[in-house]
């Protein structure tokens, strides 16, 4: 994932997912004022209870696609062929950027309870939860630092009084803060 503020025909700066700074000249094809966050594939569309179209995203979030000029102009959402053409394309998911676990998921499994000594070393390095699966970090005792490559970067201390969502396919790592005990739940759609 690359995060960039793009303005047409000007030099722009960007930071790649591995932390390297880069710069380029924005082309005529670049969109003006585009901020790219966590991109998710559109897997379908549905109509909500008041008749508005909703994009169904691969992360299990729903995103309204309302054609309400001048605030939002998406006339294609009213056309069945145009909606079908957009299935498989991507769009930014601000709910994934905020690490918000979607409603309606089923608990698939829970890890063992780990402490600073028994915690797998791989959790301290950048890694990802599988596509379509959400993690939920629960701290029983102490606290952990959770860092995820969202936009903006999520960098929070997770304590025993709250859980932390972990979006699918997003680089993240955890760092124990002193003596701690925690487990990770994995959530998804029941098959």
Image: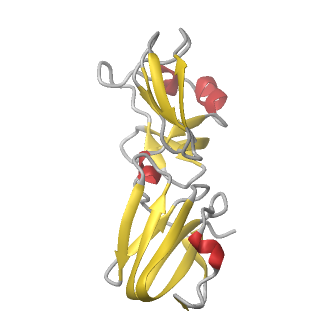
Name the spot of residue 15 as percent of width and height, x first.
Answer: 51, 38
Above or below, comparing residue 131 to residue 44 in the picture: below
Q: What colour scheme has been applied to the protein in the rendered image?
A: secondary structure
Name the spot of residue 127 as percent of width and height, x first.
Answer: 63, 63
Residue that extends furthest to the front in the rendered view of this protein: 21
> Which picture quadrant has residue 177?
bottom left
Locate residue 133 relative to residue 30 in the image: left or right.
Answer: right
> Which picture quadrant has residue 24?
top right
Q: Is residue 130 visible?
A: yes
Q: Quadrant of the N terminus?
A: top right
Locate residue 159 relative to residue 3 in the image: left or right.
Answer: left
Name the spot of residue 160 as percent of width and height, x first.
Answer: 35, 84
Above or below, comparing residue 98 to residue 180 in the picture: above
Q: Nearer the viewer, residue 186 or 37?
A: 37
Above or below, comparing residue 58 to residue 119 in the picture: above
Name the spot of residue 88 as percent of width and height, x first.
Answer: 67, 37
Residue that extends furthest to the right in the rendered view of this protein: 191
Q: Quadrant of the C terminus?
A: bottom right
Measuring 54% from the left and 70% from the top, which residue is drawn there? 135
Total numbered circles = 0
> Which picture quadrant has residue 161?
bottom left
Measuring 52% from the left and 22% from the top, which residue is drawn there? 76
Above or below, comparing residue 18 to residue 3 in the picture: below
Q: Nearer the viewer, residue 153 or 105?
A: 153
Locate residue 125 relative to residue 182 in the image: left or right.
Answer: right
Q: Nearer the viewer, residue 165 or 114?
A: 114
Measuring 60% from the left and 24% from the top, which residue is drawn there? 82
Q: Is residue 103 visible?
A: no
């Amino acid at each position: 994932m690359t995060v960039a503020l793009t303005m047409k025909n000007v030099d722009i700066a960007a930071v790649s997912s591995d932390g390297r700074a880069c710069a380029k000249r924005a082309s005529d094809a670049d969109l003006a004022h585009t901020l790219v966050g966590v991109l998710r594939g559109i897997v379908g569309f549905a109509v909500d209870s008041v008749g508005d179209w909703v994009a169904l995203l691969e992360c299990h979030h729903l995103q309204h696609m309302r054609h309400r000029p001048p605030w939002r102009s998406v006339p294609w959402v009213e056309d069945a062929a145009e909606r079908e053409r957009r299935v498989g394309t991507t769009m930014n998911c601000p709910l994934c950027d905020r690490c918000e676990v979607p409603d309606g998921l089923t608990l698939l499994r829970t890890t063992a309870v780990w402490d600073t000594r028994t915690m797998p070393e791989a959790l301290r390095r950048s890694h990802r939860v599988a596509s379509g699966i959400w993690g939920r970090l629960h701290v029983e005792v102490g606290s952990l630092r959770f860092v995820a490559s969202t936009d903006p970067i999520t960098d929070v201390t997770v304590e025993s009084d709250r859980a932390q969502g972990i979006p699918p396919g997003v680089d993240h790592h955890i760092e124990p803060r002193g003596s701690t005990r925690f487990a990770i739940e994995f959530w998804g759609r029941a098959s």
